Amino acid sequence: MSEHEYTPKSKVGKWFNDRLPLLTLANHLTDYPTPKNLNYWWTFGGILTFCLITQIVTGLVLAMHYIAHADMAFQSVEHIMRDVNYGWLIRYIHANGASMFFLAVYIHIFRSLFYGSYKSPREVIWIIGIIIYLLMMAAAFLGYVLPWGQMSFWGATVITNLFSAIPFVGEGIVTWLWGGYSVDNPTLTRFFTLHYLIPFLILGLVVLHIWALHVPGNNNPIGIDIKKPSKDTVPFHPYIVIKDGFALLMFMIVFAFFVFYTPNILGHADNYIEANPLVTPAHIVPEWYLLPFYAILRSVPDKLLGVIAMLSAILILAALPWLDTSKIRSAVFRPLYKQFYWILVADVLILGYVGAMPAEGLYLLIARIATAYYFLHFLVILPVLGFKERTTPVPLSITEPILGGSPNLAAVKKKDSFKDQ
Amino acid sequence: MKNFFRISFLIALFFGFQFNSNAAEKVEYLKTDWSFKGPFGKFDRAALQRGYQVYQEVCSSCHSMKYLSYRNLVEEGGPEFSVEQAKAIAASFEVKDGPNADGEMFMRPGRLSDKFVMPYENEKAAQAANGGAYPPDMTVLVKARGGGVDYIYSLLQGYEDPPAGVTLDDGVYYNKYMYGNKIKMSNQLSDGLVEYSDGTNASVEQMAKDVTTFLMWTAEPHLETRHKMGFKAIVYLIILTVLVYFSMKRIWSRIETKV
């Protein structure tokens, strides 16, 4: 940003900018050179920002009417649904917004995996992203507990009990988390506090995430380093702004469909039954976005090892920039990686499916195979592939074809032709 | 545009999995036409009023409706009783109020602002009166059961004699739609049980449908507003999306297209 020479035109603007260079920042954001071949998978960053703001704004309003007390939480949610003006709308946006947020973040993460956006020099962006993802899962879990329905209560019981797997101090930690000897009112009040706090931590990390992105600039579908600004780039405003806006509107149509026409389909019916410590639901299932990790947890017979496996499944992503040894970023030029990528996508979907099923018989077997493959992909396939794979030639720039004529010219053209659409 | 199909496909796949997983271990429920289903669905006003009558005369002796107030019966999108009718309904119940100036609790006729009167003092009393089973509160019952309205509708008509080999304890009944088939509520509906003021024939099927419609409304009192607003919101979004799409094309046409 500092090499950016910018002087506001107005006197007042200049006076202010000399004291706090907000206008320089605004100028940087509008002029920010962006690769012109970004496809629609790149619009999910903007969509995620929208999701975060939506969750924070609706959440603030809900918090004005919600009562974090074990005897009143369920009732206060019904009060929001019935008596608060448009309370039903705000709550349904917030509840479905969580699902939409995760849908978008999974697309965002898998986009990064396909185009190798996590590789040098973007490791820090990636790691901040993983921390954001972890905090999102924590916020979603804590938020699901707040309505104090059956699934809230038993979900909280199951998840907090995972900490008891820690040797020696486990039981103590669980009691400390609960604020008592079972999930009860103290648990609810602290969960509410943390649920309120985490989104603002995420917001701060998002600023860092974008800041870190603006140092090397965006990766792009062909994964090459580009000169900035150049013929390969367009200014962020208006080109990317309007494109992100268009994609966001498409996303909002899907979002609106869920909110207005099937607002409860992604939730569990049991959560409309008030929490009852004496009655355990037949199946305790987390929300859909946590199912793959739930499947990994249950596929390991030992409790402690299961928890370790589940945590490693997420944390292994942070090591990804070093596990993937290939110098080529984009899967477009990595024929083998491309195939393994889609197998991984299928693997995660299968894990999500078996996560919703009872952990027995064939489902358990499938879960175990899928879990093993998940780790195999990151720990064996990716490191080996970097050395063994024969990549196809990579173009030197977005606008110019490869020197000496390339068999891959068609691919480059295809990737670059989005602006004709 | 191709990417949109890919994205939509992925979304469909994601939620396809989800629906599938929810659909596990379901029995075929009885089907009927619900007026409130679909993007333009509305409640059948007469069915809601009849449904209230069935709830009041049959269900309410055991099942509470604790999140509903008598004023809700008047509100738009509900049974829409007239204010006089609702006041009369409320006044027909005795509500415990107080303490008065002497520190005594006293009984008075209900008002519109009162919550529906509970059939039992507390959960223990309800259990004691029902062989240990607690009749669940009915306000959000249809949202609290996996099969929703179809499940409630079927359950009310699902009583039959137990198949050979199934023995039932005293006070336990066989219902083919109940989870585990054993239910502590006996068959409540029989033809002509209530007398509808609008002359509708009170068959078991009709009563089951009416009361289930009423329960859908108690669970989702703003369903009609939601459907109406959703239609407007989505039409607005689609128009805006089309406009933004053409603006985008225009703006991007400034970039030369040669590779």
Image (cartoon, coloured by chain):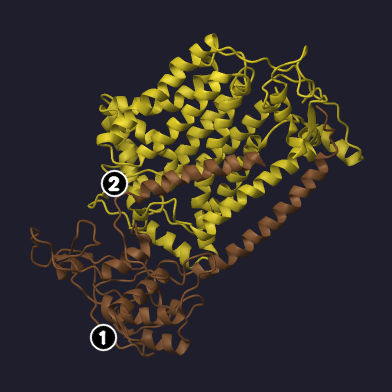
Chain colours: A yellow, B brown
Nearest the viewer among A419 and A164 is A419
Residue A226 in the image, given as x and y percentages of width and height: 75, 20
Residue A163: in sight, yes or no? no
Q: Can you identify the residue that label 1 sits on?
A: B192
User: Toward which corner of the image does residue A21 lie, by quadrant?
Assistant: top right
Residue B94 in the image, given as x and y percentages of width and height: 30, 83
Crowd band around label 2 with a 10 angstrom C-alpha radius: few (<14), some (14–19), many (20+): few
Residues at marks 2 and 1, CA–CA distance in whole angstroms: 39 Å
Q: How many marks?
A: 2
Q: Are the two marked residues, 2 and 1, in contact with CB atoms closer than 8 angstroms?
A: no
Nearest the viewer among A30 and B125 is A30
Residue A364 in the image, given as x and y percentages of width and height: 29, 33
Tell whether A155 sits left or right of A265: left
Q: At 39% from the left edge and 47% from the top edge, which residue is drawn? A: B20
Crowd band around label 1 with a 10 angstrom C-alpha radius: few (<14), some (14–19), many (20+): few
Q: At 74% from the left edge and 29% from the top edge, which residue is drawn? A: A416
Circle 1 sits in a helix, a strand or a loop, which is it?
loop
Q: At 18% from the left edge and 71% from the top edge, which residue is drawn? A: B186
- Whether A197 is drawn above or below A114: the answer is below
Q: Quadrant of the C terminus of chain A?
A: top right
Circle 2 sits in a helix, a strand or a loop, which is it?
loop
Q: Can you identify the residue that label 2 sits on?
A: A283
Residue A144 in the image, given as x and y percentages of width and height: 42, 47
Tell whether A305 sits left or right of B20: left
Disc 1: host chain: B
User: Toward which corner of the image does residue A101 lie, by quadrant?
Assistant: top right
Amino acid beneath label 2:
His
Disc 2: host chain: A
